[in-house]
Image (tube, helix red, strand yellow):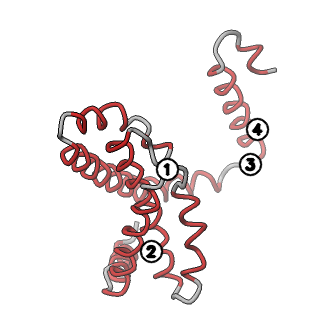
Amino acid sequence: MELSNLLLGFSVALAPTNLLFAFLGVLLGTVIGALPGIGPSAGVAVLLPVTFGMSPVSAMIMLAGIYYGAMYGGTITSVLINTPGESASVMTTLDGFQMALKGRAGAALGMAAIGSFIAGTVSVVLLMVAAPPLADLAVTFGPPEYFALMVLGLTTLASLTGGSMLKGLL
């Protein structure tokens, strides 16, 4: 991994205008995520026309902010009214809503925000480390490897159906 490209990416992302668009994206995304039934994908699709007049880098940063904000925004309704704003927040209803009933809604939302930040940061770092070797490996795949990968996927799916694997394959 070349550090010069990573440093260039940080310098572009940390430009004041891009930070402003990231903040606006997260703010809009949090509002969208708090609306039950409208998830991150729908939020990005609805707000895509807003980015047409922007530079491509700023638009991508804003759309990423909308997506990540919406992922967290689903937690707000999960904790406060026991209705997940999107599917990834379903498990938050179990503990978060119980904490809200006991008067600790702020603590539940804070823990969810910190957990989201840590998980997002760790996953981005792992993606930066793992993506180049995986891309090099994927380039070497030929027809036999693709076939083996498809068989592995179908077999795994069939085994998850429960009961007989033969019924799962059919």
Q: Which of marks 4 and 3 is in front?
A: 4
Residue type, numbered disc 1: Pro
Classify 10 Å Cα crowding around label 2: few (below 14), some (14-19), many (20 and above): many
Residue 82 screen position, x and y as percent: 39, 38
User: Considering depth in this image, is 50 or 153 the residue closer to the camera?
Assistant: 50
Q: Residue 65 is drawn in which quadrant?
A: bottom left
Q: Residue 84 is drawn in which quadrant?
A: top left
Most distant residue in the right direction: 170
Distance from the alpha carbon under mark 2 to that under mark 3: 35 Å
Residue 147 tag number: 4
Residue 61 tag number: 2
Distance from the alpha carbon under mark 2 to that under mark 4: 37 Å
User: Considering depth in this image, is 159 or 46 the residue closer to the camera?
Assistant: 46
Circle 3: element type: loop
Residue 142 tag number: 3
Q: Nearer the viewer, mark 2 or mark 4?
A: 2
Earlier-in-chain disc, 2 versus 3: 2
Q: Do the residues labelled 2 and 4 touch (CB within 8 Å)?
A: no
Classify 10 Å Cα crowding around label 4: few (below 14), some (14-19), many (20 and above): few
Q: If the image is split into quadrants, where does the C terminus sit?
A: top right
Residue wearing tag 1: 36
Q: Do the residues labelled 4 and 1 touch (CB within 8 Å)?
A: no
Earlier-in-chain disc, 2 versus 4: 2
Distance from the alpha carbon under mark 4 to that under mark 3: 9 Å
Q: If the image is split into quadrants, where does the N terminus sit?
A: bottom left
Circle 2: element type: helix
